[in-house]
């Protein structure tokens, strides 16, 4: 019998509403169907992330694997395409896929994340190395970040109008300039799209392997923004957020072989978008109340720090 974790159910329903409830109702049957099709047997407790369930399984013809089923959201659609393109280079190996069910059979890693296993500059350096290895010529048919540029610029205008006192005008202007100067024309490079320390797991075949990619085509430096934003929570708890952010940028861009000024601009844009998005929708780790207020203050500070670097 498959029992879904209560926390995963609660978060999914809170985020997706009735569509999430309907998907959750069918999920145990989907897991059983995929396991039978791919000749798998459960081999441990269910795990879960932000949008999907992961079931450790054993398969007769391969090493231990995991069966992953994700909520059918457009941003999850291209994950198997990215994993297929990488072929295990810096990311988990894709063994089977069912795109209609948003289901995949993947190489099994250790459950330890980079966020749990490393500290300080090592986190950013390892993430930067993974980013460098994932930056390969993109296959045809994947979504391009540059196609979002016009929408990003319009959203920044709308946010500045709706929340006029949220951020200094200099900070918003810098983010808008990044969209205009960097976002409309980007390389044909496959990038992760959500590269944070929780999406890098300890592997056996390689020391560290990326999971949960978005499979976007664009500027590799974009991933520095996600990593920097996610690291800001830990760095703020350690004190002197500005110094921590500078060291994170140094370590990531050095390992990723990226221009630091360009990566900083993407990180600043990401922070500004998070500051406004938090006011509109909250955050995955804090959608309401005091935690949401705390995170808004944090990304506000992050945006101002990155503007001044």
Image: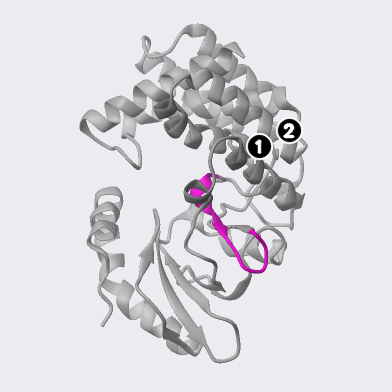
Q: Quadrant of residue 47?
A: bottom left
Q: Quadrant of residue 10?
A: bottom left
**Spot occupied by residue 163 in the image (x, y as percentages of width and height):** 36, 16
Q: Is residue 268 visible?
A: no
**Spot occupied by residue 217 in the image (x, y as percentages of width and height):** 68, 47
Q: Which mark is residue 296?
A: none
Q: Is residue 142 above or below residue 230?
A: below
Q: Secondary structure at mark 1?
A: helix
**Residue at (62, 26) in percent of width and height:** 247
Residue pointed to by mark 2: 185
Q: CA distance from mark 2 to mark 1?
A: 6 Å
Question: How many labels were placed on the picture?
Answer: 2
* Mark before the other along the chain sequence, 2 or 1: 1
Residue pointed to by mark 1: 146
**Residue at (56, 25) in percent of width and height:** 245
Left or right of 277? Residue 83 is right
Front residue (pair 130, 180): 130
Specify how the rendered protein is coloured.
one colour
Q: Does residue 201 belong to the magenta stretch?
A: yes
**Residue at (44, 81) in percent of width and height:** 34
- Is the residue under label 1 in contact with that under label 2 (CB below 8 Å)? yes
Near mark 2 (Cα within 10 A), the count class, few <14, some 14-19 or many ≥20, is some
**Residue at (51, 50) in percent of width and height:** 117
Image quadrant in which the C terminus is located: top right
**Spot occupied by residue 65 in the image (x, y as percentages of width and height):** 53, 77
- The part of the chain drawn in magenta is 196-207
Q: Secondary structure at mark 2?
A: loop
Left or right of 196? Residue 298 is left
């Amino acid at each position: 019998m498959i029992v879904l974790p209560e926390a995963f159910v609660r978060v999914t329903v809170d985020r997706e509403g009735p569509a999430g409830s309907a998907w959750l109702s069918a999920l145990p049957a989907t897991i059983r169907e995929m396991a039978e099709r791919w000749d798998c047997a459960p081999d441990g407790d269910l795990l879960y992330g932000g949008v999907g369930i992961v079931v450790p399984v054993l398969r007769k013809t391969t090493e231990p694997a995991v069966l992953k089923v994700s909520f059918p959201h457009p941003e999850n659609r291209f994950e198997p395409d990215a994993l297929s393109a990488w072929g295990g280079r810096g990311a988990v190996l894709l063994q089977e896929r069912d795109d209609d069910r948003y289901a995949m059979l993947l190489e099994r890693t250790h459950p330890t994340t980079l966020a749990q296993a490393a500290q300080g500059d090592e986190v950013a350096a390892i993430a930067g190395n993974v980013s460098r290895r994932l930056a390969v010529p993109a296959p045809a048919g994947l979504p391009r970040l540059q196609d979002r540029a016009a929408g990003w610029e319009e959203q920044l205008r709308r946010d500045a109008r709706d929340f006029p006192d949220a951020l200094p005008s200099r900070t918003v202007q810098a983010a808008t300039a990044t969209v205009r100067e960097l976002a409309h024309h980007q390389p044909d490079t496959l990038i992760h799209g959500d590269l944070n320390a929780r999406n890098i797991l300890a592997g056996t075949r390689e020391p560290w392997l990326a999971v949960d990619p978005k499979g976007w085509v664009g500027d590799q430096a974009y991933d520095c923004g996600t990593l920097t934003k996610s690291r800001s929570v830990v760095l703020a708890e350690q004190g002197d957020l500005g110094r921590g952010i500078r060291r994170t940028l140094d370590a990531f861009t050095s390992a990723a072989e990226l221009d630091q000024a360009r990566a900083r601009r993407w990180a600043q844009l990401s922070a500004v978008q998070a500051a406004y998005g938090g006011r509109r929708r909250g955050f995955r780790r804090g959608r309401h109340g005091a935690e949401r207020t705390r995170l808004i203050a944090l990304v506000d500070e992050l945006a101002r720090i990155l503007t001044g670097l």
